Image: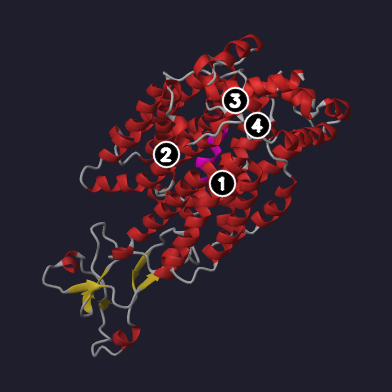
Amino acid sequence: MGFAELLDRVGGLGRFQIIQLVLLCIPIFLMASHNLLQNFSAAIPDHKCKVNESAAFNTSTVDREGWKMVFSPMDSDGSIHRCLEFVNIQWRMVSANNSWDNATNVDTRSCKNGWEYDKKEFSSTIITEWDLVCSQKNKRQLAQSIYMAGVLVGAIILGGLSDRYGRRALLIWSYLQMAVSGICTAFSPNYIAYCVFRFLGGMALSGISLNTTALIVEWIPTKVRTITGTIAGYCYTVGQLLLAGLAYGIRDWRWLQLCVSLPFIFFFLYSWWFPESARWLVLSGKPEQAVKGMKKVAILNGKREEGEKITLETLKTDMIKEMACGKETYSALDLVRTGTMRRISCGMSFVWFSTSFAYYGLAMDLQKFGVSIYLIQVIFGVVDIPAKLVSTTSMIYIGRRVTQCISLFLGGLAVLANIFVPADLPVLRTSLAVFGKGCFASAFSCAFLYTTELYPTVIRQSGLGLGSTMARLGGIVAPLVKMLGDFYPFLPLVIYGGAPIISGLMVYFLPETVNKPLPDTIEEIEMGKKTQKKQKEIVPLQSPKTNTALQEMSDGHEK
């Protein structure tokens, strides 16, 4: 008997699993807000050079009938230039055309007195507060890249720590870190402080994401893993819609930041109720704590009698192989130590990178569509609903591998198709972008579940950490690729679309995991999934250290 059978004995999908799933999913609503928050907190309103009113008023020829003062030249699109002003105030006839405004003999300079911002749509953003426009405009993208770098560092550090110290402890810490860093971000006195606290918030988001996924998967029976994973994905989708509503009602970036950060204090307080993953406890050599946790779960699920039957001796008997594996230690090198693990790690790394790379290339520049930013956010959120529904159905009836492959392939094709759509067809271009974003959301949903099922329990969090690391690298690189559009306008779309197509082809070489129990050891991955018969065949093929532990446990049990 393995852990899956023990889980069924204490209730399977019972009251405990349902309560835990609900409590773990509530914070996911606000994870979307933090990920996409800068679409609103760093939105760029219309702006122009601030006029020195006193200088204009003191102009000796201030009153000329049929003439008006001009302070800035015209841009190429016929609007007032956002970044330049005339050194000397110019006069223009009211009925005259604008051709002379850009004459080369008229001296201009960068805005000397700052900028005036249109506050009809946004009362305050980090752009208006710290003048991140014109020569400082790249700081907007830099802030988002720093946040993604935080998510990357969090995936590397917190993923490994979770395998060593447990899912529960790291999840509790991540909630606290998100609350503190988010609140500090809202009170940032300057741009540097803002970036530092956003970096810490990104780290916390990785910890929440990785450990939430692990606790859901490791306490849920095999047959309903797909459903529960999809529920968590839909919470993120609804979170995108929630962000649009919050941003529409709260137009000041500081209050918006505070609104999406304060609830994590509540999440931190109730997270102490979560029990540690019993599967992790067994494989970490802590069977006594695992027995206590299983008995509490049995009581909550109304299976007290079954829970009383679980003792340290029966646990050792039923899970002798898993407990033997707990005697060994594992590191990130185990992700690439064997042939099958190298294939899985390589394939899923590229899947995570390309999905995130293309996803954030589409989702983090909503103002380019030329319509209400709130409407686009809603559309981008709503498209996830049918996308994930189709993805869930496909994962159940067709399989994880095919679903992952098709989602990436179609998303990449949608991005590439936009290369051939003229700029004067914005509806078609937006529609293709929305379809592509839906495909990448489907790919993300599948990748989370597929990754947890591909990696064994002993290095599952390290595997998720690797995937999350590659995803954040994609998120960091995505804004930089946009800069290539200054040289070749079509090149960013070629890269955004080509990467997921290539990764979709690589998925074909990964194993299928649908309706199969979670692997616990690397040996199971190499030799095939466990059955009662195969477990007996696998044991002799363990490493010498594992064989010694198995023999000691067997001898002890016989005595």
In the rendered structure, are the residues bearing label 4 and label 1 in contact, judged by CB atoms less than 8 Å apart? no
Q: Residue at x 32, y 82 (%)?
A: 52
Q: Secondary structure at mark 1?
A: helix
What residue type is disc 2 on? Met
- Say whether residue 283 is left or right of residue 88: right
Q: Residue at x 50, y 22 (%)?
A: 403
Circle 2 Cα neighbour tier, 10 Å, few/some/many (<14 / 14–19 / ≥20): many
**Residue placed most toward the observer, 315 or 160:** 315
What residue type is disc 4 on? Glu
Give the mark nearer the N terminus: 3 vs 2.
2
Q: Quadrant of residue 216?
A: top right
Q: Cα distance, mark 1 to mark 3?
A: 22 Å
Disc on res. 470: 2
In the rendered structure, are the residues bearing label 1 and label 3 in contact, judged by CB atoms less than 8 Å apart? no
* Residue with the mark numbered 1: 207
Q: Secondary structure at mark 2?
A: helix
What residue type is disc 1 on? Gly
Circle 3 Cα neighbour tier, 10 Å, few/some/many (<14 / 14–19 / ≥20): many
| Figure quadrant of the C terminus | top right
**Residue placed most toward the observer, 352 or 141:** 352
Q: Work out whether 36 lies above or below 320.
A: below
Give the mark nearer the N terminus: 4 vs 2.
4
Give the mark nearer the N terminus: 4 vs 1.
1
Q: Secondary structure at mark 3?
A: loop
- Say which of marks 4 and 3 sits in front: 3
* Residue with the mark numbered 3: 520
Q: Which residues are magenta?
A: 376-386
In the rendered structure, are the residues bearing label 1 and label 2 in contact, judged by CB atoms less than 8 Å apart? no
Q: In the rendered image, is residue 480 in sight?
A: yes
Q: Position of residue 51 (x, y in %)?
A: 33, 78
- Say whether residue 358 is left or right of residue 330: left
* Residue with the mark numbered 4: 218
